[in-house]
Every structure is written in C-alpha cells, then in structure tokens.
Amino acid sequence: MKKFNGPDENGKFGIYGGRFVAETLAAPLEELTRAYAAVREDPEFRREFVDTLKNFVGRPTALGLASRLTTELGGAKIYLKREDLAHTGAHKINNTVGQMIIARKMGKSRIVAETGAGQHGVATAAAAALFGFECIVYMGSVDMKRQALNVQRMELMGARVVPVDTGTGTLKDAISEAMREWTTRVNDTYYLLGSALGPHPYPQMVRDFQSVIGKEARAQILEIEGRLPDELVACVGGGSNAIGLFHPFLEDASVAMTGVEAGGHGLASGRHAARFHSGSVGIFQGTLSYLLQDADGQVLPTHSISAGLDYQSVGPEHAYLREQGRTRYESATDEEALAALRRLCRTEGILPALESAHALAYAIRRAPELGKDKILLVNVSGRGDKDLAQIAEFSEVAK
C-alpha cells in the first residue's frame, strides 16, 4: 500500500499545505519549525509529554462498545473512543500540552490562541496555568454567546478572553486576530494553533500530538476484538481529532476512514460548512486546501449548530488523503447531529459534544448497512456540557 507520511520539507501534502504568510511571520514560523524538529528527536521531551498526558490529561482514554445503541441499530458493532473523558473534556488538551512544552523550550512567556467551540481555549488556559504562562484567547463574539460556559472556564483558569466582532464573529475571525497579535510580539509570544490547519509546521505538529488518539485506539481494539475495525469515523472541522484518529491506521488497507463535516441546514440550502461538498482549492489563513469561496475567491459564510465545525476551510492533510482515495467525507445536518446526541444520551448515558454528534449521526446511518460482524470505531472528540444552552435554544426554535 502507498505510504502516507508527509509533509515534505516545504510543508506540503501533495499540492496541499505549505506556508503562505506575510513576511513578518516567516521568521517566527521558521523558528518554530526548527524547534519542533529538535524536540521530535529529544527523548526528554517525549518523556515529559507522555508523563503529562498520563498524569494531567488522564490518558489513555477509554474505548468501549456502545452495546445498547449497537443492538438498537441491528448492524455493525459501534465502539466509542472516549476523548470526552480527557481533562477539560475534549481531545484539544493533547495538542496544547505538546505545544506548551515547545513554547517553554523556546523561551516564550506568553501564549496566544484562538477558539471556536471553546474547547481549545479551555485546554490552552488549563495548560497555561499548569506551565505558568500568561494566556490570551481570541474568540468570536458569536461563539462567546453560544459557548458562555467555556468562556467562564477559561477566565477561571486565568486566561484573558478577547471578543472578536469583525467578520462573522466566529472561528476564522478569531484565528485572524490571534495571528495578528502574534506578529506584534513574536519575541516573547507563542501562537498555539488548535487544529491541523494553518501554515507549516502546524498541520504536522498538531497531527503528531493528536495521533495519540489513534495509537491508543489501535492497541485497544486489537486487545478487545483481536482485529482492526472496519471503519473509523470522526467529525471534521479543521480536522485535528480526525487526523489524530486516522494517522496511525493509514497503512492498514482494510480500515476505511470517514470524516463527517457540518451539513448545517442541508447541503442544498447553502447554509453549511461542508467544504469537500461545495468548496474548491484555495489559500486561506496560511495554507492551501479546500475552502468555501465564491468564483472571485471571496470566502463564503458558513453555518453549523456546532461552533467547532463552523469554519470555512479544512486541514491540508485531509485534502491530500481524500485526493489519494484514502479517506472519504460525508456530512450530517444540525437536526441529524442533535438527534444523534439525544440518542447516545438515552442509550449509553453519554452526552457528546455537538461536534462529535455529527460523527455519531453518520455512524447511526452507516451501522445498519453493515453486517453484525463489522466494527465501526467512532471518536467522541468531546463532551457536550458546553452545548446545553445551544441545544435548548435549537429545540425551542424547532418547536
């Protein structure tokens, strides 16, 4: 089977990825690239990273059979990788811990980050408190309203949350503002990007830190079932939880991989965030990938009930793997995601994040199409406490 290592020395996954930034960011990105290359070969860094994941994050996270849901659907077994059980409630903490150790080794004293659903912001605030960094988190004003609980959590842990009113007041605008501040204070500030997107080396670095998900899941399913799953399923916004699950299985030809984007109000409505369905290749926020844009290259607005999937582009490695035929991408609407969330609550006693519920919605469609001897492994990337107000609001509007 073809090898899927990447990126190359220019940060490219095939034609995707790379580094398309203003001159002011060229030097700090090169500094970060050198720093990351050094720590990848450093046993001391590896020991500290693994130790912090164990004793602070609470890894390994569980992998368990959703037995009642499986029985109800009457098809493939559904196993859940429980990233919702990680400290701070989502997979984001894996990456923030790794990058925070790098920031300290680089001699930085301030952390600046962006957040959409708030989970990356909370993870960054928690890790900054652990390592003793000043922490500033940019968050779109729209997202601050629908994720008010996470704003409170960030502030309790000492982070300063800066509202972003420009543009659509969502994740893309928060990223732009965070990168803008980074350019003004590159000497003492580290930009901690939360997903597998942006300019090189971020897509590779975030993927590598999140691949702990797939490494654990691979060992766990082999121990439980004695074989690999037939299909992996994960939601895809920027794509960090999905690439973290997928990457350790890339060389296993028998394992299919499906990413699930936000279908919003339906693909025909135009109000969604399904980049692979309606997008085209272009440059956005430092990288070349698929994005939602018009014929003139203007970025289009997106919509999702989940703030973490409400983003115009997708990580470049996902674009590459899709082009190579190694992965495929489906979508789930707001209503399907909400129905899947409720179903998991009532059958398994697990409240998933709205982002994760998109992956579950696909799995609920998919499992009955497969025989009972098949295995679906679904990444529950986060827990849904943060979404309770959003769920209640959506339910009231839908009445």
Image (spheres, grey):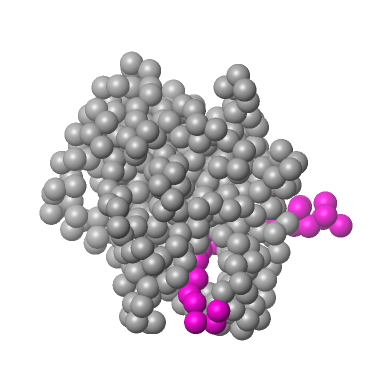
**Residue 248, picture quadrant:** bottom left
Q: Position of residue 220 (x, y in %)?
A: 35, 75
Eyeballing the image, is 137 above or below 338?
above
Task: Relative to 284, say whether 105 is above or below.
Answer: below
Any magenta on residue 243?
Answer: no
The location of residue 228, given as percent across then percent down, is 37, 73
Q: Nearer the viewer, residue 184 or 275?
A: 275
Q: Quadrant of residue 9?
A: top left
Disc tally is: 0
**Residue 58 % position (x, y):** 36, 66
Q: Residue furthest front?
A: 1
Q: Nearer the viewer, residue 119 or 307?
A: 307
Q: Quadrant of the N terminus?
A: bottom left
Judging depth in this view, the residue of 368 and 89 nearest the camera is 368
The answer to whether any part of residue 14 appears in the image is: yes
Please, is residue 323 above or below residue 11 in the view? below
Outermost top residue: 23
Residue 392 belongs to the span the image colors magenta: yes
Q: Residue at x 50, y 71 (%)?
A: 376
User: Image point 45% across, 53% down: which residue?
Assistant: 327
- What is the x, y in percent for residue 309? 57, 46
In the rendered view of the protein, which quadrant contains the C terminus? Answer: bottom right
Horizontally, residue 149 falls left or right of residue 322, namely right
Q: Is residue 187 left or right of residue 254?
A: left
The span shown in magenta is 371-399
Vertical arrangement, residue 237 with respect to residue 355, above or below: above
Residue at 57%, 40% in the rendered image: 275
Residue occupying image coordinates x 67% and y 75% = 346
Residue 21 relative to residue 356: left or right: left
Residue 139 visible? The answer is no
Residue 27 vs residue 150: left or right?
Answer: left
